Amino acid sequence: MTALLSRRSVLKAGGAMVIGLGPAGRALAQLAPEAEAALGKTLDLNEVDGFIAIHADGSVTLFCGKVDLGTGLRIAIPQMAAEELGIGLDRIAMVEGDSALTPNQGSTAGSTGIVRGGVQIRQAAATAREALIRMGAERLGRPAAELDATDGQIRPKAGGPGIGFGTLVGDRRFNLKLDAKAPLRTPASYKIVGQPIARPDVPAKVTGRHVYVHDFKLPGMLHARVIRTASVGAKLLEVDEASIRDIPGARIVRINDFLAVVAGDEWDAVRAMRALKVRWTESTTLIGHERVQDWMRAGPFMADEVLSKKGDAGASLAASGQKLSGTYYWPLQTHGSMGPSCSVADVRDGKATIWSASQGTHRLQQICARILDLQPANVRVVYLDGAGCYGMNGHDDASVDAAMISKAIGQPVRLQWMREDEHGWDPKGPPQLLSLEGGLDSDGRIAAWRTEMWLPRATANLPNPPLLGPEAANIPQMQGLSTGLITQNAEPPYAVPNVQVLVHWLKDSPLRPSNIRAPGKVANSFAVESFIDDLATAARRDPVAFRLDGLSDPRGIEVLTRMAALMGWQARPSPQGGGLGRGIAYVHYKFNETYVAIGMEAQVDRATGAIRVQRVACAHDCGLVINPDALRQQIEGNILQTLSRTLFEEVTFDRGHVTSVDWMSYPILTMPDVPELLIDVIDRPNEPPLGAGEAACAPVPAALANAIFDAVGARLRTVPFTPERVKAAIARGFA
Amino acid sequence: MASYRFSVNGAARTVDSSDPDQPLLYVLRNALGLTGTKFGCGLGQCGACTVIIDGDAVRSCITPISAIAGRSVTTLEGLGTPDTPHPVQAAFIAEQAAQCGYCTNGMVMTSAALLARQPDATLNDAKLALAGNLCRCGTHHRILRAVMRAAGRTP
């Protein structure tokens, strides 16, 4: 063990070693007094000073535009910076997602936290180290080549006294452009990167001391609740102010159809929200969840687009001896954050400060400036932790709600949504419908493949309201939300000579859409990797061997073979029948990122249709591993959350509004459902780091569908896999 | 405005409330500043608001303040501190059993109540005790490992 590690408490955690930081549980750096002192600093992405400040005592503050959504960036990015700078992690604090302090590194979405956020800061740290060595060379009177940065000092490599970072820089600016060519330390020399160092926020979270946005208070702050329309698109007819007259300090905030109540006491605000008598117009603009598939086929459409074309899929399919087809449906799903969205806003005297759990505080700063009619420079959005979100949940809406209310009453406001607001009104993962056709040649290889997809074109110009508050208040705003790159991984990652992928872009979406974890890729991989197993069955091949035949990428081959070894895969064709089955699925995420293979064992009760997932095995290659324990936790979360989405989850709605508005009507995975997890992390220190926040989601649904097929010979093509659907599939037989 | 006297984390407290139906959750978070207890659903469905009352894990979001008079409430803050954590909290830290951490309060409190009653609880006991505590990040595995660690079993 190195000296660096031996100074810290070491806790054994099962097989993994988790290394604890010295000071247990530090408050978020954006709430520390030092953050205020840094106001006015550069936010330039091209300046070292944008990302790094070195203080007189030699400690370091990092300014990171990405935020930790519970994913471990709060430890991983400081690890990357500490390694390059040559300083202990206990000397580093990190400010996250403060629009007045951190460079805009883009939203924390799409598994880009390490890949973009961390890598940029790593390069800034490498540039800073070069500068520190130059300064040290001058002060010590020795050539730079003889010096290195170690433990917060510039020291001769041969030994002897050094000079501290604080003495060299001490609260002065670097005034230095970020050097994209500044050399990085070699992976063989890493002492901090690659170590399973404990996350600094866990002790505070586990003892109730961590300050979430829900827990943040301002002097004179009022509590607010927003009252959403009775149905989507309804208009406000009448509010009976007298109906809350008896509740102390309660009053109404109304801006056109935007309606909220405020009170000095939070419970009084809740009571006022419930007591307030409101009349709305009737609105029946929705299609209802049971009609979504028919609606997707019928349109109206914006355009058709061929996304991928190789050879002649049509002609080859027509000539195939064995031709298969299947249609797959993924329903609308909610982010289902455990805590309803919350925000604290103080909008007074032409300035606004908004504490928000948004994934994109810089983007939200611009949005709030427009909605509040303020200059962006006078709007500051500060990230504080919320309940985990996995894409854009209600956080941005709640932040804008709070800001509008605070502006209206000229006092600081804390707004929290209720459970029915979050389930009912967070923007939803959009529905996806895919029809696949495939043909085998006479050797049992895939000769032709055609994917036809129906997808909401949710990236721009939708009639859906981007944010609820301004829509109701009739305040102009940009139209269009992003659902993420939902067309990716819609074709096989294996050698197929003739391929076509066609998408029918729908004009609208059944409910307001947004990105939800592994956007699109979960549904697309579900369809593609389920259908690969159907083709393997038709070819009477073992599912692993069938995939390996079409795979030439050595990293893909390695995750498949290591996953098969991990779960003791017995090579044979599916199905076996008998009620206990095993399935596998593989993804090369976005075709250029992380490699994941997942195997699953599931027991299916033919009489009841109940599914019991017993074991999940995962081999995972995301290149250089920064923190193996935090990475494992992301993989575990990806697997369990996607199992939940696959087994249980569908947003239901009628003609007026969402009807799955609590945890009874929208059930998720519970403790008794949890399977055994086996995870094999492949570390490639000489490869770039890739994202790990989403990739392991993608193979989960197909691995389960394939295990069910192996168990009972029934093919599930519609999510969620309810007992009724399992029984219906068993009744259909080998269709 | 009525006054309610009860014990919180070992100290006698008196709280005024104009509504006897005010849930304990709001009293803890606002009047008493104990924000470790979280609002998740307000319906008793998710467990994020769990506290221990006279030894039992109870949902504070559906427990009226009037039902608390004279009773003894323990919150996450009262269980232990970062420097001197309760054995269950220490086990959660050792297993890094929190992602976003919003459900953690309920997981720790329910587990602490379980182990106080049944110190040698098995994995199956833990799964059943925590069946009504929801987690969205997918930390279930580590939470169960932490409970087993606190029970003195191999995680």
Image (tube, rainbow, N blue to C red):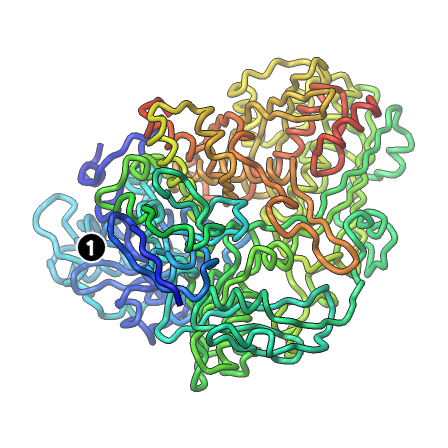
Image spot of residue A650 (x, y percent)? 69, 45
Q: In front: A256, or A390?
A: A256
* Residue at x 70%, y 13% (from the top left corner): A578
Q: Chain of mark 1?
A: A
Q: In front: A143, or A192?
A: A192
Q: Is residue A409 left or right of residue A449?
A: left
| Residue A476 visible | no
Q: Is residue A341 above or below residue B107?
A: below
Image spot of residue A495 (x, y percent)? 71, 32
Q: Identify the image quadrant of the C terminus of chain A.
A: top right
Please state which amino acid type lies under the numbered disc 1.
Ala
| Residue B35 visible | yes
* Residue at x 61%, y 56% (from the top left corner): A420
Question: Residue A587 falls in which quadrant of the image?
Answer: top right
Q: Is residue A679 above or below residue A649?
A: above
* Few, some or many residues within 10 Å of mark 1 (<14, 14–19, 20+): many
* Residue at x 55%, y 24% (from the top left corner): A615
Pick out the residue farthest to the bottom: A349
Q: In front: A413, or A537?
A: A413
Q: Identify the image quadrant of the N terminus of chain A.
A: top left
Image spot of residue A595 (x, y percent)? 55, 36
Q: Which residue is mark 1?
A: A144
Task: Classify mark 1: helix, strand or loop.
Answer: helix
Q: Is residue A551 above or below residue A539?
A: below
Q: Is residue A401 left or right of residue A459?
A: left
